[in-house]
Amino acid sequence: MTRLTIDPITRLEGHGKIEIFLDDRGEVERTYFQVPELRGFESFCVGRPVEEMPVLTNRICGVCPEAHHLAAAKAADAVYRVDPPRTAKLLRELLYCAFFVTDHTTHFYALGGPDIFVGPDAPVAERNILGVIRKVGLEVGGRVIETRRAGHRVIELIGGRAIHPCTSVPGGLTHGIGEDARAEIETIARSMLDFAGLSLGLFDRTLTGDPATRELLLGDLYRHETYYAGLVDERGRVALYDGRVSVMAPDGERLGTYAPADYRDWIAEHVEPWTYLKFPYLRQVGWRGFVDGKESGIYCVGPLGRLNAADGMATPRAEEAYERFYATLAPPVDGHRALVHQRGASHWARLIEMLYAAERMLEIVADPEITSDDVRAVPTETPTEGVGTVEAPRGTLTHHYWTDERGILTGVNLIVGTTNNHAPIAMSIERAARGLIHSGVVVDDGLLDRIEMAFRAYDPCFGCATHSLPGQMPLEVTIRDSNGGTIEVLRRD
Amino acid sequence: MIAPDRRHRFAMYGAASCGGCDISVLNLHEAILDLADRFEIVLWPTVMDAKYDDLAAMPDRSIDLTLFSGGIRNDENEELARLLRRKSAILVAFGSCATEGCIPGLANLRSVDELVATAFEGPTTDNPDHVRPMTRWPAPEGELHLPAMGRLVRTLDQVVAVDYRVPGCPPETERIAEVIGLLGAALDGKAPLPPTGAVLGAGQSTVCDECRRDRGIKRIARFERIQDLASIDPGLCLLEQGLPCNGPATRSGCAAKCPLAGAPCIGCYGPADGVVDFGARLMSAFASVVDASEPGQIDRILDGLPDPVGQFYRFSLAGSLLRGARVTRTAPPEPVEPVLAGATQGADS
């Protein structure tokens, strides 16, 4: 048995490792995608005041702290059964849409971009954002930088800080925005909308002009027929800040929708001994191992999951782009909805969401109540238990808290975006390896990068995923005190 | 020293971290191009494709500047810390995790058993056989390895010698630009290197000194929870409105962004210059705004803080003198039989 190791996998947030085993004929026997660390937030947040969760849990992930900040704030609202004023909810959503444009820009150009614009066969030194800028030109490169700067400006205007925002509290926000800030955000949103359109055009032209990249991203190498999930609004359209979770079967039939507070009826998490990360699946379909199809409860979230789980987009230009996406990649079969299963199409889906988020920002800043001072409701109920769910860029993010009557946490359960995608990512890596590595094929750096592209399409964030803490290791001696608490751990190797 | 005929070599690495430090560096925006101009970036897994083998092959001290973010949670983090120390001429503990443990350092309040039970027996976990991740697992195709977790989260300087420390969760982008400018100029020979051990990218005073809110006006009769305040005065010191704001003990450098946005300082820039113990300093600062004449009254007011450990050691627990709360024990433990952990052993066994 031959073993190939890719360590660390790169251009993602957090750590990961891929082990590929080849049989005696040089064919892929099995791949293992391992997440090597965990940190323990669900445990050590117990005992903390619930109003701190928006600033404690954003330290789960510095790439998407806005997602944890708002999921935590919504869970804290729910713990107190307090409904924030309309302006507070709009401001949170406005911050969140600016964050989506920013984060999707980071992924499309800096993390995934090298695969799309530079290509896996380019020298390693070229496969980064600087190589992308050399390919797309300084003008587009300048727009990338400007969009990221502007996005962080909006986040700071509403959230207080550009990274790890601090202003969401139970019941709303610590401050509102004035007309100057509103006008500034409106200008930024227009520029972002323009940039999203430009990025879609660039993607389109790149795929048209480069059939090999098109085949790589949209062919069968990274294709899996799984379930899909994502938040939708009351008309079944993609929602980011709030909504019901829609679950779509691989054949395009909706399995159902549920209120986020009912997530435990829908989601369970499988455990394997070779990775620190769990594998969520649909409880009513069941865990059948690492296989796709309608009998397997594995589901996919994130841009592709959201588009597949929804019936459309809530803003005009995004809706137009959505229609084109499906007309091109998955036209209806006998009048029935078909889904896009190629994981490389996530890059395209991400740009459609960027368009939506920018259009939604323009709707929100035009709202007459957006500069109101009424941004916080004081809770009156005794705190108990609450669930908060948002769509993180990488997928559905759920925070669930239990507290005592003072609002001190007694329990925490988190299911984060990337964790939902853990099984699909593991399957995509194995499929890519099987498709690429054969007897007599030279395994070079470009080939291994094509395997990494299988996870990169998901834009994974293992900082997020590793919020929980590791298990007790084998080959260790644990010495305990009389209460069962560990006082010493000795490694035996 | 540095040969003049080549660009300086730069590395950035995140151990047990959230990636926020990486994003804060990326937020240099145009200045990131200057960084790429001035330095040859030899390792930065978040944004480029060099692997660990490439790092191991580099000559010792061949990386001129390494920014190391993240805490030391497992043996892989520790191995990379030692490797990067060996390969780097200047090693910077970058951000709160590397300098003082940050929020993930609060895990030191729990035993590994408690952490395990929470993570792998949680309300959505389907784990009837109590499976645990294993450092070595005999897969049918070959043995798989995972890093082993340490008993405590450690800071970088608890593992290797550190040349400089840059505080903040994350360090503010403007401060990062200053640090890179400063160290870049020193590497160019145009400025002296700061003294070893210096705190860079931050001020010497406290967040209060950067905060524009009015203070010295009111004393408080009790602490408030922010959700219970009917309104937040936009101009008055948050501490004097009863909110437990960590500004008085926290190092300046962030421009007091949180308190100016109406949110109490949570202390992410670590202890101000000369403060040995963040919690002790903060406690005395809190006592000084309390409207009480007797020690008993002060105690009652401080009792209004529902989570003292979280309040006083939110970011600094791992790096503090305490390191973890479990080090305090009133009596020596009873001798017990060692327990050998197995593949499918329950956390409660």
Image (spheres, coloured by chain):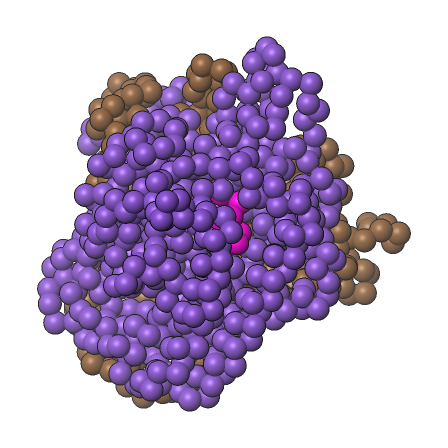
Question: Is residue A365 at all visible to an observer of this figure?
Answer: yes
Would you place residue B270 above or below residue B331 in this image?
below
Q: Is residue B198 left or right of residue B261?
A: right
Would you place residue B82 above or below residue B3 in this image?
above
Q: Is residue B198 left or right of residue B216?
A: right
Residue at x-position 73% and y-position 48%: A126
Residue at x-position 28% and y-position 63%: A235
Q: Residue at the far right: name it.
A: B5
What stretch of residues is rendered in magenta? A343-350
Question: Is residue B95 at all visible to an observer of this figure?
Answer: no
Does A348 appear in magenta?
Answer: yes
Would you place residue A166 above or below residue A121 in this image?
below
Does A110 appear in magenta?
Answer: no
Q: Position of residue A267 (x, y in %)?
A: 26, 41
Residue at x-position 71% and y-position 39%: A121
Residue at x-position 74% and y-position 37%: B58
Q: Position of residue A432 (x, y in %)?
A: 55, 32
Q: Colour of chain A?
A: purple
Report the magenta stretch's main SS: helix
Q: Quadrant of residue B180?
A: bottom right
Q: Residue at the far top: name it.
A: A24
In this rendered view, identify the residue nearer to me: A191 or A160.
A191
Q: Position of residue A243 (x, y in %)?
A: 27, 61
Would you place residue A158 above or below residue A236 in this image?
below
Q: Which chain is brown?
A: B
The quarter of the rendered structure image containing the C terminus of chain B is top left
